[in-house]
Image (cartoon, grey):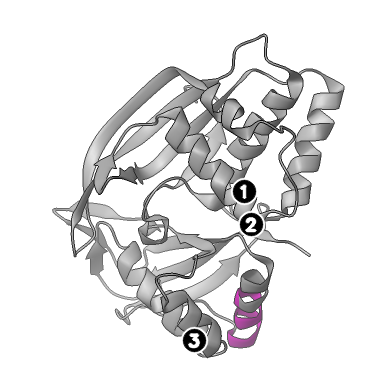
Amino acid sequence: MPSLASIVFTLTASAPTSMPRYSARVLHASFLRWLERDHPELVAQLHDENHPRPYTLSNLQGELTPQGERMRMEAGAKVWFRLTAMEELFLQCVLASIEKQQTGPQPDDRRLVPGPVYHSIDQHPWADLSSFAQIAQTVARESSNQPLRQHVTLRFHSPTCFVENKQALPLPAPRHVFGYLLNKWQLASPFALPVEEVQHFVESIHVSHAKIETEQVDLQKYQRTGFTGEARFALHPALPENYRQALHVLAKFAFFSGVGSHTTMGMGQAVQGAWGK
């Protein structure tokens, strides 16, 4: 049974229309209404600010044209957004709603018509089903074949920031990026990372390369400044192989967990990749 998922919901514009540039806050409301039809108790929990949200949500992607603070779609435009899940029960509820309703969330704008839902990488490059065990086993297998690289690259596809002392920090500081990933992994995964001194592991990571830009995100209630681009995170060559394993595990996990603040509002969409590609 998968415990991690990236589910892509597709939409087609039946007539010209537009959405806010940072549309996840609108899509988030649509998603919760959709899920509430079958799982009202779960959605009531998700509305509780003290309840951790085991998912992320992207902004609208696809055939979009920037138009000021909005993204325009022509008639027939194909667009999509993705939901990631990090908890087995939550994921089971989402998959059950997809099977029962045979369609994804309907935005308030009825000109956007829900289409196929994808959860396989064969169907869509941003869709996948996995598990904590699968990620850990994949990295362990790669490590047994040959020593892992001492660095990983993360691409930040949507503005990313961290909130500390009520201030937004729009920089890929390793202690924030991997501290966040470590915390998410420890909260949700039944598998421990292959390092015992996790704090020393996080403090051992440094940025070897970075190419980022910052931009301001309108979250309606407030503004946040986040960074996009890519950063390479590295360990000292003398550190043991299990440190490299932990680095690669968390880098792969970022695809599902997102990184940083406001990940249910489109921020912090990240994926492991190769530098400069």
Query: Of tags 2 and 3, which is closer to the observer?
Result: 2
Residue at the location (52% across, 25% down)? 203
Viewer-nearest residue: 139 or 95: 139
Q: Secondary structure at mark 2?
A: helix
Q: Is residue 32 above or below residue 156?
A: below
Viewer-nearest residue: 26 or 125: 26
Q: Is residue 86 above or below residue 254?
A: below
> What stretch of residues is rendered in magenta?
94-101
Query: Of tags 3 and 1, which is closer to the observer?
Result: 1
The numbered mark, 3 or 1, whose residue comes first in the sequence reads: 3
x, y percent for residue 230? 42, 29
Farthest residue, direction left: 68
x, y percent for residue 88? 68, 67
Q: CA distance from mark 2 to mark 3?
A: 23 Å
Residue at the location (39% across, 21% down)? 210
Q: Which mark is residue 188?
A: 2
Look at mark 3 in the image and give the residue it sits on: 36
Q: Which mark is residue 185?
A: 1
x, y percent for residue 191? 75, 49
Residue at the location (36% across, 63% down)? 77
Secondary structure character of the magenta stretch overall: helix
Q: How would you rate the neighbour count of disc 3 (Cα within 10 Å): few for under 14, some for 14-19, many for 20 or more?
A: some
Q: Secondary structure at mark 3?
A: helix
x, y percent for residue 163? 32, 46
